[in-house]
């Protein structure tokens, strides 16, 4: 089977009260289960291929997943915080944040990360 996971507000939860992101360890276990089952596991992000590639490396799952452009292939199951209609079965991961809040927090995190690397 082909299984896809989104990043922002799916694999990484947006915490509005703290204005940051944390991994969703339960969903990471689901990803690991599919990988261990021999399924093809993909990660995508509206942030693009480079963003997703850096993310999977940082999280240490680059050997388990293939990064693809969102919607590049038809998958059997997708996990996403938005309804995608890109899979046979779409699992909507419910979060409290809006799309605008996700963009604001993720862009602030990217800026903070770049500043700390300088």
Image (cartoon, helix red, strand yellow):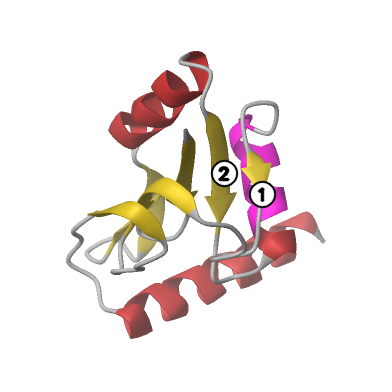
**Across the whole image, how many numbered discs are drawn on residues?**
2
Task: Check the picture and name the quadrant holding the C terminus.
Answer: bottom right
Front in this rendered view, residue 66 or 89: 89
Neighbourhood count class around disc 1 (C-alpha, 10 Å): few under 14, some 14–19, many 20 upward: many
Residue found 55% across the figure and 63% down from its top = 45
* Figure check: 7 above or below 111: above
Outermost residue toward the bottom?
Answer: 100
Left or right, residue 55 beside residue 20: right
- Marks 1/2: CA–CA distance: 6 Å
* Figure check: 65 above or below 92: above
Neighbourhood count class around disc 2 (C-alpha, 10 Å): few under 14, some 14–19, many 20 upward: many
Badges 1 and 2: C-beta atoms under 8 Å apart? yes
Please name the predominant secondary structure of the magenta segment in the image. helix
Front in this rendered view, residue 43 or 20: 43
Residue found 18% across the figure and 58% down from its top = 94
Residue on which the image places disc 1: 67
Residue on which the image places disc 2: 42
Place of residue 14 in the rendered image (x, y in percent of width and height, measured from the top left): 33, 60
Asked if the stretch drawn in magenta spans residue 50, the answer is: no
Place of residue 7 in the rendered image (x, y in percent of width and height, measured from the top left): 47, 54
The magenta segment is 52-61
Element at label 2: strand
Outermost residue toward the top?
Answer: 36
Residue found 51% across the figure and 56% down from its top = 74
In which quarter of the view is residue 25 placed? top left
* Figure check: 78 above or below 56: below
């Amino acid at each position: 089977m082909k299984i896809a996971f989104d990043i922002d507000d799916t694999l990484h939860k947006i915490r509005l009260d703290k204005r940051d992101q944390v991994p969703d360890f339960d969903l990471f276990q689901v990803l690991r289960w599919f990988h261990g089952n021999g399924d093809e596991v993909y990660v995508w992000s509206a942030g693009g291929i480079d963003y997703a590639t850096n993310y999977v490396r940082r999280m240490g799952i680059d050997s388990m997943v293939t990064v693809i452009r969102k919607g590049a292939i038809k998958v059997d199951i997708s996990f996403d915080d938005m309804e995608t209609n890109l899979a046979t079965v779409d699992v909507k991961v419910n979060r409290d944040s809006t799309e605008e809040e996700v963009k604001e927090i993720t862009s602030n995190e990217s800026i903070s990360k770049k500043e700390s690397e300088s």
